[in-house]
C-alpha cells in the first residue's frame, strides 16, 4: 500500500505504527528472527484498527530489504524509513519507491550542510583516527560516519562530539550502539515518521512507535507519537525516556516485546 496512492486516502487509515528493525523487531541470528505471532497481530490490526505499519531503521534501504527477506516476512510493511530519514513505499509490484520530494530535500540539505561543515568534520575525523580505535565512514554513499570498536569507545566519542558540535546546531548525529552517522537536525526517525503520518492524514495522537537504541529517541517523543514503547533489551537511555513519558517498557526481548507492547497499547486480547 503506497502512502502516496489515492487508494490510501479513501482507505482511511486510523493508526500509524512505526517499528525500529534491529533489536526491536528482528534479531537476525535467532530462528525465527521475528516471532510469527507478530505478523498475525499486524494482519488482524490491519482489519480491526486500520493500521499503516512500517519499519523505521538506521539501515540503508538495500540492507533493510535484505533483512526483511532474511527474516522471512510473510508480507511487506507499508513503508520503510531508511538511514533514519529516507522514506520509501512499495509500488504495486513490491518495488520500493522513494518519496521523491522528501528524499530529494533530505539529500540536498545534507549535501549543503556537509559542505558547510567540511572543515569541522575533517577535524573530527582527524581526532577520531588519531585518538581512538574507531573507523571513519560506515558504508558507500555515507559521507560522514563512525564505527567504534566498542560501545564504551562510542560513549567517549559522543562526549567529545557533544562539545565539538555545540556551535553548529544544524549538524547532529544518530547513534546506534557502536555506529554513528552525522545528520541534519531536521531529518531523523521522528521527523520522517511525522511526515509519513502527515501524508496519511494521521497525527501524533494516532501514532505508535517502538525502538531500542539512541537513534530511536527522536521518534520516542510524545509530541510525535502518543503511544511509545521499547523492548526489554533497549538501552538505558531509551528505557528511561519511555518510562518518564508514561510509555510501555516490555518484559520481552525484541519482537516478543513488540507483541507485548502492541497488546498493551491497543488493549488487544491474546
Ligand atoms: Mg535497534
Image (tube, rainbow, N blue to C red):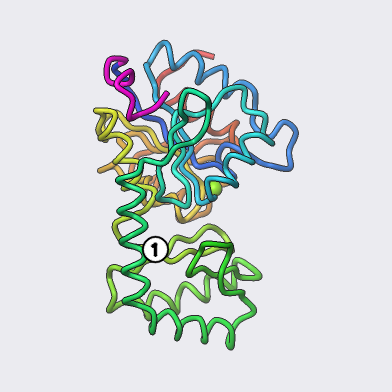
Q: Is residue 179 left or right of residue 113?
A: right
When asked about the image quadrant of residue 21, the answer is top right
Q: Is residue 118 left or right of residue 232?
A: left
Q: How many marks?
A: 1
Q: Residue at point 39% right, 79% down?
A: 118
Quarter of the image with the C terminus is: top right
Q: Nearer the viewer, residue 244 or 114?
A: 114
Q: Nearer the viewer, residue 122 or 218?
A: 122
Q: Residue at point 53% right, 50% down?
A: 60
Image height check: is 240 above or below 174?
above
Percent position of residue 204, x then y = 26, 35
Percent position of residue 174, x then y = 44, 60
Magenta stretch: includes residue 172: no
Say whether mark 1 is within 8 Å of ligand 1. Answer: no
Query: Magenta segment, which residues?
Result: 1-11
- The secondary element bearing badge 1 is classed as strand
Percent position of residue 166, x then y = 31, 77
Residue wearing tag 1:
183
Image height check: is 255 above or below 81?
above
Q: Residue at point 40% right, 11% down?
A: 48
Image height check: is 264 above or below 250?
above
Quarter of the image with the N terminus is: top left
* Classed neighbour count for the residue bearing mark 1: other residues with Cα under 10 Å, few (<14), some (14–19), many (≥20): many
Q: Is residue 124 left or right of residue 109?
A: right
Q: Residue at point 39% right, 38% down?
A: 228
> Quick check: can you spot residue 99?
yes
Q: Nearer the viewer, residue 268 or 200?
A: 200
Q: Nearer the viewer, residue 256 or 47?
A: 47
> Quick check: can you spot residue 232?
no
Percent position of residue 242, x then y = 40, 45
Amino acid at each position: 500500500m503506497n502512502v502516496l496512492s489515492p487508494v490510501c486516502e479513501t482507505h482511511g487509515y486510523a493508526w500509524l505504527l512505526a517499528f525500529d528493525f534491529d533489536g526491536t523487531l528482528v534479531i537476525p541470528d535467532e530462528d525465527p528472527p521475528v516471532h510469527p505471532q507478530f505478523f498475525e497481530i499486524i494482519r488482524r490490526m490491519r482489519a480491526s484498527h486500520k493500521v499503516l505499519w512500517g519499519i523505521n531503521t538506521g539501515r540503508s534501504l538495500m540492507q533493510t530489504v535484505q533483512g526483511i527477506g532474511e527474516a522471512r516476512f510473510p508480507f511487506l510493511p507499508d513503508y520503510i524509513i531508511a538511514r533514519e530519514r529516507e522514506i520509501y513505499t512499495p509500488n504495486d509490484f513490491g518495488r520500493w519507491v522513494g518519496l521523491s520530494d522528501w528524499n530529494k530535500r533530505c539529500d540536498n540539505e545534507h549535501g549543503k550542510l556537509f559542505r558547510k561543515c567540511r572543515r569541522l568534520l575533517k577535524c573530527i575525523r582527524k581526532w577520531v583516527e588519531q585518538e581512538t580505535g574507531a573507523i571513519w565512514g560506515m558504508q558507500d554513499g555515507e559521507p560522514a560516519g563512525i564505527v567504534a570498536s566498542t560501545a564504551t569507545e562510542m560513549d567517549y566519542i559522543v562526549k567529545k562530539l557533544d562539545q565539538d558540535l555545540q556551535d553548529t546546531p544544524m549538524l547532529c548525529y544518530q547513534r546506534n550502539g557502536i555506529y554513528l552517522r552525522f545528520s541534519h537536525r531536521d531529518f531523523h526517525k521522528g521527523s520522517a515518521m511525522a511526515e509519513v503520518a502527515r501524508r496519511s492524514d494521521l497525527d501524533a495522537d494516532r501514532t505508535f512507535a517502538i525502538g531500542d537504541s539512541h537513534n530511536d529517541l527522536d521518534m520516542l517523543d510524545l509530541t510525535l507519537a502518543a503511544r511509545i514503547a521499547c523492548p526489554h533489551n533497549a538501552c538505558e537511555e531509551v528505557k528511561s525516556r519511555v518510562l518518564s513519558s508514561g510509555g510501555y517498557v516490555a518484559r520481552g526481548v525484541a519482537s516478543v516485546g513488540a507483541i507485548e507492547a502492541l497488546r498493551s497499547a491497543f488493549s488487544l486480547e491474546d
